[in-house]
Image (cartoon, rainbow, N blue to C red):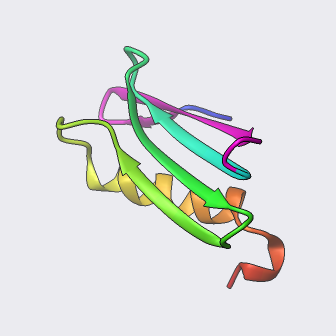
Amino acid sequence: MNPIEHKGRVYRMLRGSDIQRDGMFLELFDSKENQLFEAFYSDSTDEMQFTSFTTEDVPFEIIEEFLRQARILLTPIENKE
């Protein structure tokens, strides 16, 4: 996935499958490789969960883009509006 740049700060996202939790995840990392967020879509419950691992300020535009990408990349096609 392409990195996201905002006012000189670079963020990257990682998407993967989690067999044990039966779903897909999208993670956001800062330039120091600290994990900031995780969005997880559960195939068994058809629900999306968001977890923040940081107390640092993250620009609102980055949060918006992360959540938008999570909706696009993690949910099944029939659930997209």
**Horizontal relation, residue 29 to residue 73: left or right:** left
Total labels: the figure holds: 0
At a point 82% along the width and 81% down the height, the residue shown is 78
Q: Position of residue 40 (x, y in %)?
A: 57, 53
Residue 79 occupies quadrant: bottom right
Query: Looking at the image, which residue sits at the far top?
Result: 32
Q: Position of residue 44 (x, y in %)?
A: 73, 66
**Horizontal relation, residue 13 to residue 54: left or right:** right
Identify the image quadrant of the C terminus. Answer: bottom right
Q: Position of residue 27 (x, y in %)?
A: 53, 39
Look at the image and say whether residue 49 sits in the magenta stretch. Answer: no
Of 70 and 20, nearer the camera is: 20
Picture layout, residue 8 above or below residue 42: above
Look at the image and say whether residue 16 sits in the magenta stretch. Answer: yes
At a point 26% along the width and 47% down the height, the residue shown is 59
Query: Looking at the image, which residue sits at the far right?
Result: 77
Of 15 and 18, nearer the camera is: 18
Query: Looking at the image, which residue sits at the far front?
Result: 20
**Horizontal relation, residue 53 to residue 29: left or right:** left
At a point 66% along the width and 71% down the height, the residue shown is 45
Identify the image quadrant of the N terminus. Answer: top right
Is the magenta region chiefly helix, strand or loop?
strand
In magenta, the rendered stretch is 4-21
**Horizontal relation, residue 33 to residue 48: left or right:** left
Picture layout, residue 47 above or below residue 66: below
